[in-house]
Each structure stands twice: as structure tokens, then as C-alpha cells.
Amino acid sequence: MATTKPSGLRFSESLSGYLGRGENHWSAYEAGRAANLHARFWVTVHIPNLQAFMADPEHEASLSGRLTVAGMGHSRPVEDGRIHLFCSRGEGKRLLYFLPFEHGGQRFLLQGEKRLNRPKGLDAWRQMTTLFAEVLQQADGEEALLYRGVLRISLPRVLLQAISFRPLGTINPLRFLADCARFLRFSSREMRL
């Protein structure tokens, strides 16, 4: 009896904002904006097996792409990045981003989270388009916080993200459309839980 090969999706996302030093993400964002310490990343999320992804409570997927952090190089490759979409943390859901990169022979990590707390209306838009980010230096098993701030995704970039979906593991257009519909239902449901 033949078994159906796994199929999934890939899609792209780009966020930008400012990172700096401050007591919290917003004060660091303001300090970074005043000093023009811009940060941006362009990544592609890869979900090769949509069924396994949805069954996993962490909803983990791999990321590839590039990032720019002021003073730390332009368009640095993201190495072995990952994302957790709609995982439970405390009383809410989180979208967790982990983007490792190198600069000057040293290892760094841009990590961030979108914080979802049963969003409705404009609150849903704000929470899904706001990433609280940090840059950590990694050495000898230790991590040191260098910068923090806020990155956002604009409406034009959301529209580009929506049309960036591509199939993985299938060339059947009906299966691809079915996978897109399953992923959108999953995302909509998880946002409300």
C-alpha cells in the first residue's frame, strides 16, 4: 500500500526597527531610533511536513535568510535559524524567533518574540506585527545581552508575505492549496486560544 509523502509550505517575512540600550524593549527602541541603530531581517520559514508541524506543541520550523544590525555588518547570513509559531508560554501564545549569525569571527544571536494574549481586532494586528527583539553575544557557553528593541512588519510587507507562500514536497496545486488552507485555519485558531 502506497503512503503519501509529507508536504508543507515555505513563506517569507521581513521585519525592521531599532535596537539600542535601555531598561526595557521600548526605551531601547527609542534610544536606537535616536542613534539611528537600524535592524532588519529577511527570512524564509520552511515547514516541510505540515502535519508533523501542527502536531508538535512547539510548532517548530527552520529559518533561513539574512539580517542587518547597525554596527554588526550588512546582510549577514542566518545560520541554522528556527521559529516556534504559536507555542504556549504562561497564559499566552508566543511566536519565538532565533536567528544565529557571525560578525568579526564571533557568534551572535538575534532572538525575539511576538506576544499574543487572545488578541481581537486592532490588538491582533499590533501583536502579530510587533517583535520584541534582543541581540546576544555567545562565547564559551555564555550569552551576554548587547542590544534590545522592537522590530515591526509593515502592511506592504504583510501583503508580500501573504503572496510568498510556496509548496514543499508536492507539485500538486490542489494539495498545495489544501496545505495553505490548513495552515491558515491552524494560525487563526491558535491566535484565539
Image (cartoon, rainbow, N blue to C red):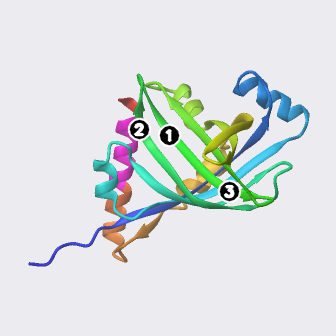
- The verdict on residue 189 being magenta is yes
Q: Is residue 27 left or right of residue 49?
A: right
Instruction: Give the residues drawn in magenta, as a range.
Output: 181-190
Residue type (three-letter) at the residue carrying disc 2: Cys
- Camera-side residue: 82 or 146? 146
Give the CA distance from mark 3 to mark 1: 20 Å
| Residue under the point 39% across and 39% down | 188
Q: Which mark is residue 101?
A: 3
Mark nearer the N terminus (3 vs 1): 1
What residue type is disc 1 on? Leu
Q: From this view, report whether residue 62 is shown above or below residue 37.
A: below
Quadrant in the picture for residue 44:
bottom right
Residue tagged 2 = 87
Say which amino acid is labelled 3.
Phe
Alpha carbon distance from label 2 to label 1 = 7 Å
Residue at (17, 74) in percent of width and height: 3
Q: Are marks 3 and 1 in contact (CB under 8 Å)?
A: no
Pick whichever of labels 3 and 2 is earlier in the sequence: 2
User: Do callouts 2 and 1 mark residues in contact (Cβ within 8 Å)?
Assistant: yes
Q: Label 2 crowding class (10 Å Cα cut-off): few <14, some 14-19, many 20+?
A: some
- Looking at the rendered structure, the secondary structure element under dot 3 is strand
Task: Quickly name the residue at label 1.
Answer: 95
Name the secondary structure under disc 1.
strand
